[in-house]
Amino acid sequence: KSYLGRLPGVWVANNAAVVQLPWWFAPREFDLGDLSLRCLGEHNAWNAAVAVALCFALGFEWPARQMTRALRSLETPPHRLEVLGLKDPLARGGSQGPHGENGASNGATARGAKEKGLRFVNDSKATNVEAAMVGLRAVGRPCVV
């Protein structure tokens, strides 16, 4: 949790961004949808939660459904833990591009399916050691760099 004064300000729990601002009586939850499938790494869920807190702190009082719709449309920017595709080394021609077989955008199909084989991830914007370490942890399985 990150705190705003004495109140916990932002945290991520049960696939939701939870925000508590000092002038609110209770915390508000915003569903992140399948963010972990669209954006690799827990840090992306935290980034989304902090963005929600900043919007409200700056006076944007959007309805919860509008905020949830925006959160559910977040995608990984190019070159930042961008899933390029999967390759099953045991299947003939078993590679799958970033749009999956059904044309889903940004690798959603590739990340949502039970993964077997190799996953190709472009994290070329990780240009320092700390960023590269965050990226490797986000992949969550053995990596070849």
Image (cartoon, rainbow, N blue to C red):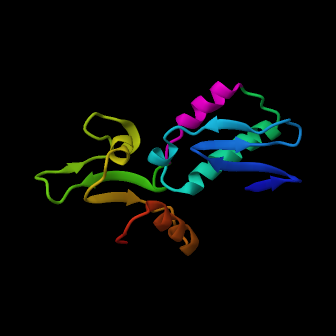
Q: Quadrant of the N terminus?
A: bottom right
Q: Quadrant of the C terminus?
A: bottom left
The residue at 45%/62% (across/down) is 124
The residue at 57%/44% (across/down) is 15
| Magenta stretch contains residue 121 | no
The magenta segment: 63-76
Q: Does the magenta stretch mainly form a helix, a strand or a loop?
A: helix
| Magenta stretch contains residue 65 | yes
Total marks in image: 0
Q: Position of residue 96 (x, y in %)?
A: 25, 47
Look at the picture and state if 126 lies above or below 41.
Answer: below
**Front residue of this view, candidates 11 and 63:** 11
Left or right placement of residue 88 versus residue 66 in this view: left
In the figure, residue 51 lies in which quadrant? top right
The residue at 67%/46% (across/down) is 49
Q: Position of residue 28 (x, y in %)?
A: 73, 36
**Front residue of this view, candidates 47 and 28:** 28
Left or right placement of residue 116 versus residue 13 in this view: left
Q: Position of residue 32 (x, y in %)?
A: 57, 39
- Most distant residue in the bottom direction: 129
The residue at 38%/52% (across/down) is 83
Left or right placement of residue 29 versus residue 92 in this view: right
Look at the picture and state if 17 lies above or below 68.
Answer: below
Q: Position of residue 10 (x, y in %)?
A: 73, 49
